[in-house]
Image: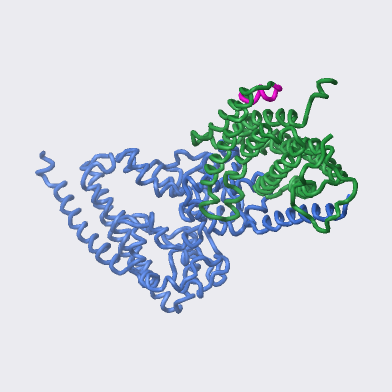
């Protein structure tokens, strides 16, 4: 119990960051396998993920001092660079040759490498002066919102490749859209009820993510393929739906970090505001 | 919970879903409407890689009738009827496509093709029955008795496998027996990813094989009035017209396919290119085909779309005269050489002596050319590329025969 009492939103976010960096390497290995690693640069994110995971472990385990902080900064800036460079490589895909819907749907997903940028920013945030303040909350919500925007785009484009053959393929699109809506509203208000609703909807995202994982794996196991590995390399991306649960967890940590900054009464302002609320209180 | 928050969240979410739905509806039907999710993804996934490698096939497919009608990559590339398969980037596809893949949708067309001379006889004329299953042999012999269950062509064996593969069989594989039991591929005439009717209507498509000294149909067509009109007026023709609804307004000038295959003005479309023929013009001595009278009637019916009855009958009568005269000339030459062989002045082996090559050229080049010229309206091919060459070659042949029979040669 004491251990749990010591866990802070920042510490949870650090564990979130290191596990995501590590897992992203596995996911990208599967994705680039479909391309048979045609370009040597496709190995870069996998190698980076392995190295960055090692760099982030000391900080995630709670070690203090300049070395873990420096390692985190190296991993954080490295993730930003890998993400931006990866996006530039993906930009050379068909969509930028001819801006057609076909190319938009079937090109290499140029948004996907930005997940590294998001993780890099999270790592840098957790080493900034906001890390242990309530200001961490809105930033985490913002990063989660950015993730859901990407998730929405990938859900639309990936399932468009499938022609939305099953009606259930619209569920993640609607789910991500709802998450974007509630996260945007949560960022713009300090109402406790909105945050509660946000948590509930994030719970729904976990359900959608796990259900998607089961559906994707089931589809892969039932498709014809030369080998078991091929089922997952060329089939529905098994781990992709788990991003819903993953981002929901980040949003939940963000709301946790916002504790003590709520207002019981509705805000007196008359219109919606996109401003990130300034942290006004601590516990 | 404030209504403002609910309202904004719902508006944002709904707008995003609506946007995704509207964008999806803008996509081509071939990328959305398929019988299975695998087939949907195949169209775009295939294009994704093949636009970088063999990009032309994507452009050809996208402008084809297949794409317009929602036929996707896997519709053709899936393995049917026991075809060998291969795993390719997550898809299981047929190792080689044959006419059987096309027959999934175009069964009638394939059935007509399979009973034509483009199928088993085309292959057998070079390769004999080798490579054919008992069933394929039976199908071929049923429609073309004696033309399928035969020995391979002697010249092919003499010239060697390289010449046979890249020469003879480049054309004669149109009737190649496939392991799946079918014959040939439709792509010889329609191309692969274009799957084009217009291409099959082009004289040059038929002319890929029907050209040269042994079957000069393309050259003859070029000389004919039909060919001259086609060259002058091709822009006016609707080469893409639906074969089953073809009118003279679409094709006011005929190409090979118009006369031999088309459903012009309500006629029955056929992929049996031999259906409207009357004689075996390619044979040394031409005889009427089984059903040749019916074939002639059908062809004349086609001619009548543009020409009056007396004109058609007159044309056929004159062509028949050339055929009879050419038969006499060829038969005379064959008899002379046969007599030499009978007298033991030629070896039993085929085509190993100059006289035998003269004999072969006599019917295979010039006899055929004269007859084809007559039936296709190519006067120069009746005369200078046909009859004059026959005359010249007969002189050479007689001289060679005389030399072969001379006591001097016998003495040697």
Question: In the picture shown, does residue B300 fall above or below A205?
Answer: below
Q: Position of residue B229 (x, y in %)?
A: 38, 73
Instruction: Give the main secondary structure, helix, strand or loop, of the magenta stretch.
Output: helix
Viewer-proximal residue, B247 or B337? B247
Instruction: Specify the color scheme.
Output: by chain
Question: In the picture shown, does residue B147 fall above or below B332?
Answer: above
Q: Can you say which quadrant of the picture contains the C terminus of chain A?
A: top right
Can residue B39 be seen by looking at this rendering? Answer: yes
Viewer-proximal residue, B65 or B98? B65
Q: Residue at x 60, y 36 (%)?
A: A31
Q: Can you say which quadrant of the picture contains the N terminus of chain A?
A: top right
Q: Residue at x 66, y 23 (%)?
A: A57
Viewer-proximal residue, B130 or B47? B47
Question: In the picture shown, does residue B277 fall above or below B43?
Answer: below
Q: Is residue B138 magenta?
A: no
Q: Is residue B179 left or right of residue B228?
A: right
Q: Position of residue B82 (x, y in %)?
A: 60, 38
Question: In the picture shown, does residue A232 fall above or below B396?
Answer: above
Q: Number of numbered discs present?
A: 0
Viewer-proximal residue, A261 or A245? A261
Q: Residue at x 59, y 59 (%)?
A: B68
Chain colored blue: B
Q: Position of residue A181 (x, y in %)?
A: 77, 50
Q: Which residues are magenta?
A: A54-62
Chain colored green: A
Q: Quadrant of residue A208?
A: top right
């Amino acid at each position: 119990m004491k251990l749990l009492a010591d866990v802070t939103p920042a510490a949870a976010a650090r564990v979130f960051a290191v596990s995501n960096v590590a897992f992203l390497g596995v996911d990208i290995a599967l994705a680039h396998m479909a391309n048979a690693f045609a370009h040597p640069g496709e190995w870069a994110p996998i190698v980076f993920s392995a190295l960055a995971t090692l760099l982030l472990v000391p900080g995630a385990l709670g070690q203090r001092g300049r070395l873990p902080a420096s390692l985190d900064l190296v991993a954080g800036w490295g993730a930003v660079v890998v993400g931006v460079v990866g996006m530039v490589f993906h930009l050379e895909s068909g969509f930028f040759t001819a801006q057609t819907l076909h190319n938009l749907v079937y090109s290499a997903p140029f948004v996907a490498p930005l997940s590294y940028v998001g993780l890099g920013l999270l790592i840098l945030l957790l080493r900034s002066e906001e890390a242990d303040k309530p200001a961490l909350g809105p930033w985490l919500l913002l990063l989660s919102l950015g993730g859901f925007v990407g998730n929405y785009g990938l859900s639309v484009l990936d399932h468009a490749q499938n022609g939305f053959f099953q009606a259930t393929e619209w569920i993640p699109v609607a789910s991500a859209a709802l998450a974007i809506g509630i996260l945007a509203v949560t960022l713009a208000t300090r109402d406790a009820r909105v945050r509660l609703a946000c948590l509930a909807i994030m719970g729904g995202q976990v359900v959608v993510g796990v259900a998607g994982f089961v559906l994707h794996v089931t589809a892969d196991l039932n498709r014809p393929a030369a080998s078991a590995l091929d089922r997952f390399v060329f089939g529905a991306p098994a781990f992709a739906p788990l991003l819903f649960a993953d981002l929901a967890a980040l949003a939940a940590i963000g709301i946790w970090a916002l504790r003590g900054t709520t207002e019981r009464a509705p805000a007196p302002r008359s219109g919606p505001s996109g401003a990130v609320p300034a942290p006004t209180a601590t516990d | 919970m404030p209504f403002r928050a609910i309202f904004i969240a719902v508006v944002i979410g709904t707008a995003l879903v609506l946007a995704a739905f509207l964008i999806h509806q803008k996509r081509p039907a071939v990328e959305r409407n398929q019988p299975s999710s695998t087939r949907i993804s195949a169209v775009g996934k295939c294009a994704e890689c093949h636009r970088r490698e063999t990009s032309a096939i994507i452009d050809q497919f996208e402008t084809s009738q297949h794409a317009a009608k929602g036929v996707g990559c896997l519709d053709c590339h899936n393995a049917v009827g026991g075809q060998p398969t291969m795993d390719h980037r997550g898809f299981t596809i047929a190792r080689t496509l044959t006419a059987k893949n096309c027959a999934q949708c175009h069964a009638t067309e394939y059935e007509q093709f399979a009973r034509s001379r483009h199928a088993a006889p085309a292959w057998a004329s070079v390769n004999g029955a080798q490579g054919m299953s008992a069933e394929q042999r039976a199908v071929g012999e049923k429609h073309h008795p004696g033309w399928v269950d035969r020995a391979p062509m002697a010249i092919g064996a003499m010239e060697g496998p390289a010449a046979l593969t890249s020469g003879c069989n480049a054309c004669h594989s149109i009737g190649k027996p496939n392991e799946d039991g079918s014959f040939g591929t439709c792509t010889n005439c329609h191309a692969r990813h274009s799957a084009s009717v217009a291409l099959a209507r082009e004289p040059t498509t038929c002319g890929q094989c029907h050209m040269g000294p042994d079957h000069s149909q393309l050259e003859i067509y070029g000389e004919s009035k039909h060919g001259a009109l086609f060259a002058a007026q091709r822009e006016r023709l609707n080469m893409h017209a639906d074969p089953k609804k073809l009118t003279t307004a679409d094709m006011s000038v005929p190409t090979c396919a118009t006369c031999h295959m088309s459903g012009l003005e309500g006629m029955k479309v056929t992929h049996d290119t031999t259906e409207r023929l009357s004689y075996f013009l390619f044979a040394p001595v031409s005889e009427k085909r089984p059903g040749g009278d019916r074939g002639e009637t059908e062809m004349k019916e086609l001619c009548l779309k543009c020409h009056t009855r007396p004109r058609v009958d007159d044309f056929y009568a004159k062509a028949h005269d050339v055929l009879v005269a050419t038969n006499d000339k060829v038969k005379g030459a064959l008899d002379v050489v046969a007599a030499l062989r009978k007298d033991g002045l030629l070896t039993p082996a085929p085509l190993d002596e100059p006289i035998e090559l003269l004999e072969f050229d006599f019917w295979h080049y010039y006899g055929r050319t004269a007859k084809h010229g007559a039936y296709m309206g190519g006067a120069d091919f009746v005369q200078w590329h046909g009859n004059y060459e026959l005359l010249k070659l007969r002189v050479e042949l007689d001289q060679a025969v005389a030399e072969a029979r001379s006591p001097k040669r016998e003495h040697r």
